[in-house]
Amino acid sequence: MKKMNKTVTVLLAAAAFFSCGHITASIIDRSKSEHTIACIGDSITWGAGVYNTRETEAWPVLLQNETDNTYTVQNYAFPGKTLLSTGDNPYSNMQLYKDSLHTKASVIMIMLGTNDSKPQNWNHDRYREELESFAKQYTELKQEPTVILMTCPAAYELPGSSYAVYDIDNDVIRDEIRPVIYEVAEKLGLPVIDIYTLTDGHPEWFSDGVHTNRDGNAAIASYVYQQLFEENESE
């Protein structure tokens, strides 16, 4: 069987969700002088689902638009990358990763895991260990940024297959990666923005079942903005 004990992981997800609670607008400290958000991720954040218009329609760009450009949103994502150092294309092997560790951003959002779900990459225990180590690097930056973990979007299986394109495994994303993200966030005291739940049941938001299209990116940007700022604006 390709799956681990899903009952355990689903229960863990539920427990982590209720212990962490929902994200509130206090996640952003508007008193910080540097209003920059850094987004770390793979092709979904890079904008592969809107390849020809990614410079205007990737979700980090749309997020900056949501802030009326009062925040600069940096995109440190790149296609195909895994969080796992043992994966087939580790994020930590590229210069962009090194560059991201020198960002002066006051907010850092991390969404890596979709490519880790591939059968040749997935390792539950190692992913948990490496996600904790990876996130801690950013919490320890000199400017003491607010670090946010994001769950991966849902992935939609190809007809007649148990996998989405590129052998992305939605079962692993939902039943293993998402719970681990909540587990690590709770351990480190970090907030989570749940993109999986947002995109679950919305295949129309994807260009190929894995990469979000313009509508999907707009939905992610709007939801992230809401989680970060909405209550602040209503006070």
Image (cartoon, rainbow, N blue to C red):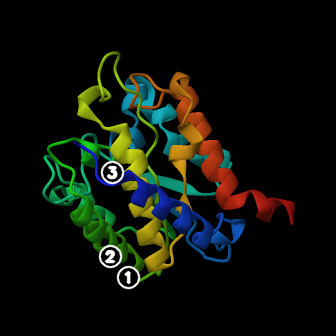
Q: Residue 28, can we see it?
A: no
Q: Give me the residue at 29% from left, 36% from top.
A: 168
Q: Which residue is mark 2?
A: 137
Which numbered disc covers residue 13? none
Q: Which residue is mark 3?
A: 113
Q: Residue 168, can we see it?
A: yes
The answer to which quarter of the image holds residue 141 is: bottom left
Distance from the alpha carbon under mark 1 to that under mark 2: 5 Å
Which numbered disc covers residue 140? 1
- Inspect the image, locate mark 2, and give the three-letter code of the amino acid beneath it: Gln
Element type at marker 1?
A: loop
Between 48 and 208, the one nearer to me in the picture: 208
In this picture, is 149 found above or below 33? above
Is label 1 in contact with label 2 (beta carbons under 8 Å)? yes
Residue 48 position, x and y percent, is: 36, 31
Distance from the alpha carbon under mark 1 to that under mark 3: 22 Å
**Label 1 or label 3, whichever comes before in sequence order:** 3
In this picture, is 200 found above or below 147? above
Between 31 and 180, the one nearer to me in the picture: 180
Residue 140 position, x and y percent, is: 38, 82
User: The C terminus is located in which quarter?
Assistant: bottom right
Q: 186 left or right of 160?
A: right
- Inspect the image, locate mark 1, and give the three-letter code of the amino acid beneath it: Glu
- Inspect the image, locate mark 3, and give the three-letter code of the amino acid beneath it: Gly
Distance from the alpha carbon under mark 3 to that under mark 2: 17 Å
